[in-house]
Image: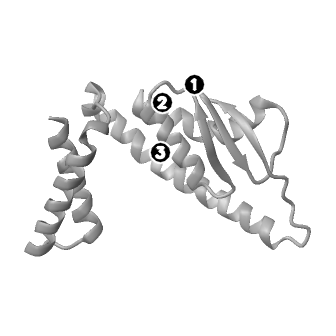
Amino acid sequence: MRAIVLFIFLFLIWLVLTFNVENQNILVGAVIAVLATALMSKYSLKPSKKILNPVRYLWAIIYGFIFLWECIKANLDVAYRVLHPGLPVKPGIVKAKSTLKSDVAKIFLANSITMTPGTITVDIKDNEFFVHWIYVYSKDEKIYTQKILGRFEKYLKRIFE
């Protein structure tokens, strides 16, 4: 069952990315989705029974807008730092503790941090995220944990947990 769901998901992604419904494209997409499913189905995550809960999808849409807003703010912050004559950067790696339990939620959080300019998730160990930050504002763990993880974590909890 997991393999069928993975195949459908991969095939739909192919169709969305190529935006082409000609016979050749559908055939190539199906072959690639079958190959990827055959190679990766044993590594895919088990779907949760809560996946059919429509409230999660509403929170996912809200999360998309929150993520977009945070990316815009981070882009402006990085642009300011790059264009400023004094180049105000104070880089460092900080350890932020998450309260997320689900591995999928942790992966989404790590990717959200990395895709936001000025931060890169370097490593995850249990509930600790090691993040390279372009400007370390504080040495207090609670402050930078809230600054880095807090903007995404509460929405990811509602979507994945």
Question: Who comes first in sequence, dot 1 or dot 2?
Answer: 1
Question: Who comes first in sequence, dot 1 or dot 3?
Answer: 3
Residue at image mark 3: 63
Q: Is residue 59 above or below residue 75?
A: above
Chosen colour scheme: one colour
Q: Could you tell me if residue 115 is visible in this image?
A: yes
Q: Amino acid at mark 1?
A: Thr
Question: Who comes first in sequence, dot 3 or dot 2?
Answer: 3
What residue do we see at 63% from left, 45% from top?
A: 122
Dot 1: within a 10 Å radius of its alpha carbon, few (fewer than 14), some, or many (20 or more) residues? few
Quadrant of image for the N terminus: top left
Element marked by disc 1: loop
- Is residue 22 shown left or right of residue 148? left
Residue 11 sits in which quadrant?
bottom left
Residue at image mark 2: 157
Question: Given contact means CB atoms under 8 Å apart, are the residues at marks 1 and 2 in contact?
Answer: yes
